[in-house]
Image (cartoon, rainbow, N blue to C red):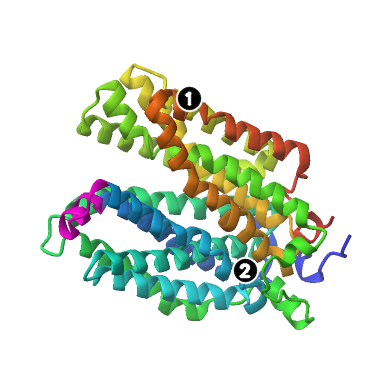
């Protein structure tokens, strides 16, 4: 096992040393001013992952009207833009070669640019290409933010930080749902949705000048031990099985969580006779109740460990998926929807914490890119198609409720093959 790095040793509770948090007199971890700023920076950046993800679904009817799209072509548009989630692998992989800071800067500027170009799109094909590119940079930004969170915060607070960042991404989706109807009423319509989305990111792009390289990557770079950016390098290392195990966990999880909320409106209206207004109210109530729980999910992971925390979160996600698509009473459906919304976001907090803790610094970016982007997001893209076909024969309720088994299968793999990583330094958790 690698020796502990001296810069990570606890110091007296006076002044922080470098970017590393120190132990207070009470024994708790105190973040440095830079770490507090970094948490804000990463949270704002990932807020727009949630905002942009939900924007297309919100503006789709208006987009269809402007560009004269049929329902079939609207579905094709969503599929094309979502390919960017998988292609983000190629930019996240570069974080092990170029450095975390450089890649995060590139992704923030890239997303801002393509969000602006999306707003200026003259036709649907330009829109599709701009949004595909925007998703590449957006998911790259999200992934590198998680690597930053793992490498720059003390072991005792790592889960909390990742949970807060993931919670901000979920909050972005809720904010999008709230503001988009207002923006669509303006003369610019759906274009204003993407113009507004660029303003805070321009500010972040300026503030990035304060951003430092992570200390762990800087040490690896100084020692000449960085990744080379080649495709599949990690599969030629002893970490191959570990990354494939995590990829399977991501894929199984996405197969449920990607669809539990996405198809709930179809189920509620078509099989429970709810109106658009009733669906909107239920989703709003569930989101408001679930959001504080999502923000606390990372703290839960720190308190009881990654595996037991995942047990609580993944069980809640499974129960939510079953309840959302089987219950009849409106109040009970809304209560189940709380579990569904919570599970959709909190499972990612748990998985992102585990995935960033199980690999050495020179492989961390590539490992996350393989597990989350290349394989996990492929299942993310394919699952709605499979669910849609199955629902034609069995209905939305039985079909989506059946996917609740997948988070439980993912949880079984976590317990069977992955070590507990909570409260341990990355140099220890990455050791084979």
Task: Tell me if residue 61 is in the magenta stretch.
Answer: yes
Disc 1 from disc 2: Cα separation: 36 Å
Position of 412 relative to 71 (above/below): above
Secondary-structure class at tag 2: loop
Q: Position of residue 55 (x, y in %)?
A: 31, 54
The reply to whether the C-beta atoms of the residues labelled 1 and 2 are less than 8 Å apart is no
Q: Pointer 1: what residue?
A: 322
Q: Pointer 2: what residue?
A: 93
Q: Answer with mark 1 or mark 2, whichever residue precedes in sequence.
A: 2
Residue 258 at least partly seen = no
The stretch of residues the image draws in magenta is 59-71
Q: Position of residue 412 (x, y in %)?
A: 70, 33
Residue nearest the viewer, comparing 277 with 246: 246
Secondary-structure class at tag 1: helix
Residue 191 at least partly seen = yes
Q: Residue at x 61, y 61 (%)?
A: 369
Left or right relative to 182: residue 112? right
Q: Position of residue 370 (x, y in %)?
A: 63, 58
Name the image quarter holding the C terminus: bottom right
């Amino acid at each position: 096992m690698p020796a502990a790095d001296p810069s990570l040793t606890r110091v007296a509770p006076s002044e922080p040393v470098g970017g590393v948090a120190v132990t207070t007199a009470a024994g708790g971890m105190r973040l440095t001013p830079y770490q507090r700023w970094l948490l804000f920076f990463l949270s704002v950046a990932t807020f727009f992952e949630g905002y942009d993800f939900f924007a297309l679904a919100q503006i789709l009817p208006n987009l269809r009207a402007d560009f004269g799209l049929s329902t079939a072509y609207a579905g094709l548009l969503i599929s094309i833009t979502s390919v960017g989630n998988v292609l983000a692998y190629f930019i996240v992989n570069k974080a092990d070669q170029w450095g975390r800071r450089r890649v995060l800067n590139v992704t923030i500027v890239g997303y801002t640019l393509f969000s602006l170009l999306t707003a200026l799109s003259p036709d649907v094909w330009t829109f599709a290409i701009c949004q595909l590119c925007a998703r590449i940079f957006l998911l790259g930004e999200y992934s590198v933010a998680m690597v930053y969170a793992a490498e720059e915060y003390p072991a005792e607070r790592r889960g909390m930080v990742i949970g807060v960042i993931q919670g901000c991404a979920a909050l972005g989706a809720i904010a999008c749902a709230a503001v988009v109807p207002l923006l669509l009423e303006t003369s610019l319509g759906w274009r204003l949705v993407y113009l507004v989305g660029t303003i805070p990111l321009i500010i972040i792009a300026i503030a990035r000048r304060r951003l430092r390289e992570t200390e762990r990557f800087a040490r690896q770079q100084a020692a000449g031990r960085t990744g080379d950016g080649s495709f599949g390098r990690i599969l030629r290392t002893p970490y191959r099985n570990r990354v494939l195990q995590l990829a399977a966990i991501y894929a199984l999880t996405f197969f449920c969580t990607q669809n539990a909320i996405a198809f709930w409106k179809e189920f509620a209206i078509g099989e429970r006779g709810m109106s658009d207004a009733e669906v909107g109210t239920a989703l709003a109530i569930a989101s408001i109740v679930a959001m504080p729980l999502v923000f606390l999910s990372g703290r839960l992971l720190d308190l009881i460990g990654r595996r037991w925390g995942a047990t609580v979160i993944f069980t809640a996600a499974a129960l939510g998926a079953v309840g959302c698509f089987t219950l009849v009473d409106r109040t009970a459906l809304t209560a189940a929807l709380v579990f569904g919304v919570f599970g959709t976001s909190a499972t990612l907090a748990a998985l992102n914490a585990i995935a960033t803790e199980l690999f050495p610094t020179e492989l961390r970016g590539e490992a996350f890119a393989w597990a989350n982007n290349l394989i996990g997001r492929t299942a993310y893209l394919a699952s709605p198609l499979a669910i849609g076909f199955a629902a034609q024969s069995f209905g939305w309720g039985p079909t989506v409720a059946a996917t609740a088994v997948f988070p439980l299968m993912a949880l079984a793999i976590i317990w069977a093959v992955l070590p507990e990583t909570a409260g341990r330094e990355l140099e220890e958790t990455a050791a084979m």
